[in-house]
Amino acid sequence: MQKKHNVLIGVACALVILAAGAAGWFYWLTAGSDQQQRGTVATQKEALHVFFPLSKTKLGRRVLEVRAEAPDRERADLILKELKKERAVSPGVQVRDLAIGIDSTLYLNLSRNFTEKQSNGPPEIVMVYALVNSFVTSFRDVRKVQFLVEGEAPFTVGGLVYAYQPLEFNKDLMED
């Protein structure tokens, strides 16, 4: 009986030593890859959808990538920059600030020249919905956009589009 007990203790000790050796070997293999992984930081990307005038009555869409942790202001500036490239908004228009309300409305405060008519620009309705559609689809939990000009809601943007209340995504202007 004593002999069986000693054999079992010997086998158990051998298994413990083998397990410790395997764990040490596994740690040694993965330690080098952990150091390599620490040197590179993987950044996740999200899509920004920018809608731009294709014609006087239709909007096209372009998808841009932005860092997932990019602040709202950075996203807004990128959208506005792309819309300026497409001549959808006047080059002088600037985002003063923005905020997302608990009612899923993005309050977009723009510079005064937003309401000024731009020569050779798109029709007002296409310009307004290029902004609305771009911001609604590029910000989580946003369903509407309320334009503010220097902190106050304008009655209209340029005399045609009523903008005193928040505007929703307009699918009727989308390219077929």
Image: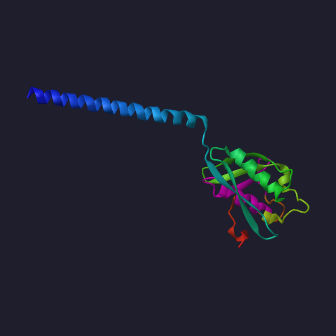
Residue 12 part of the magenta-drawn span:
no
- The colour mode here is rainbow
Q: Residue at image x 65%, y 54%?
A: 47
17 or 91: which is nearer to us?
A: 17
Q: Residue at image x 90%, y 63%?
A: 120
92 or 40: which is nearer to us?
A: 40
* Residue 163 visible in rendering: no
The answer to whether residue 172 is left or right of residue 94 is left
**Above or below — where is 2 with respect to 121?**
above
Q: Residue at image x 83%, y 54%?
A: 114
Q: Residue furthest left?
A: 1
Q: Residue at image x 81%, y 69%?
A: 55
Residue 131 part of the magenta-drawn span:
yes
9 or 85: which is nearer to us?
A: 9
Q: Which residues are magenta?
A: 127-154
Residue 17: x percent and y percent? 31, 29
Residue 146: x percent and y percent? 71, 55
* Residue 31 visible in rendering: yes
**Above or below — where is 125 with respect to 24?**
below
**Which quadrant: the N terminus?**
top left
The answer to whether residue 140 is left or right of residue 74 is left
Residue 66: x percent and y percent? 68, 49
Q: Residue furthest bottom?
A: 176
162 or 136: which is nearer to us?
A: 136
